[in-house]
């Protein structure tokens, strides 16, 4: 399956963690993963990640590895071609974004600048 140019995608490790969280939370299949960008953080912009079940008029929808990823149009401008990954190593555990649009990011990896 070819990856759509500009798509937001999810790694296998992140997919497994998302499915685990959905199961633990007993969420219905109408829920999706909402990713976004908000102002703030050390570098100016921060990532936002949550489960949602309400689509908004200008939402951009992507499906990868069986996971539906949704973002608002403004966030998409910062997140196109981004991969959502999950790390469970000793240097930090959690979701992180591999964003080719970020010109720099802070040491904690939770904020970035373009």
Image (cartoon, helix red, strand yellow):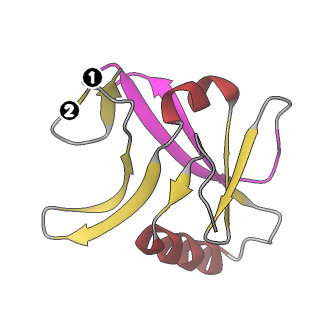
Residue 99: quarter of image: top left
- Please tell me whether mark 1 sits on a helix, a strand or a loop: loop
Residue 37 sits inside the magenta stretch: yes
Residue at 86 percent across and 30 percent down: it is: 57
Residue 57 sits inside the magenta stretch: no
Sequence order check, earlier mark of 1 and 2: 1
Q: Position of residue 12 (x, y in %)?
A: 46, 73
Magenta-highlighted residues: 33-55
Q: Quadrant of the N terminus?
A: bottom right
Magenta: main secondary structure equals: strand
Q: Which residue in the structure is indicated by mark 1?
A: 43
Query: Are the residues tagged 1 and 2 within 8 Å (C-beta)?
Result: yes
Using the image, tell me which numbered label, if any, was put on residue 110: none
Residue at 56 percent across and 37 percent down: it is: 36
- Please tell me whether mark 2 sits on a helix, a strand or a loop: loop
Against 105, residue 1 (above or below) is: below
Q: Residue furthest front?
A: 2
Q: Residues within 10 Å of mark 2 (few under 14, many from 20)?
A: some
């Amino acid at each position: 399956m070819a990856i759509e140019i500009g798509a937001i995608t999810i790694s296998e490790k992140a997919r497994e963690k998302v499915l685990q969280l959905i199961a633990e939370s007993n969420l219905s299949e109408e829920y999706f993963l909402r990713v976004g960008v908000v102002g703030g953080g050390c570098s100016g912009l921060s990532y936002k990640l949550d489960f949602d079940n309400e689509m908004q008029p200008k939402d951009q929808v992507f499906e990868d590895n069986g996971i539906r990823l949704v973002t608002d149009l403004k966030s998409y401008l910062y997140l196109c071609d981004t991969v959502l990954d999950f790390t469970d190593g000793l240097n930090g555990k959690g979701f992180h974004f591999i964003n080719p649009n970020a010109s720099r990011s802070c040491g904690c990896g939770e904020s970035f600048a373009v």
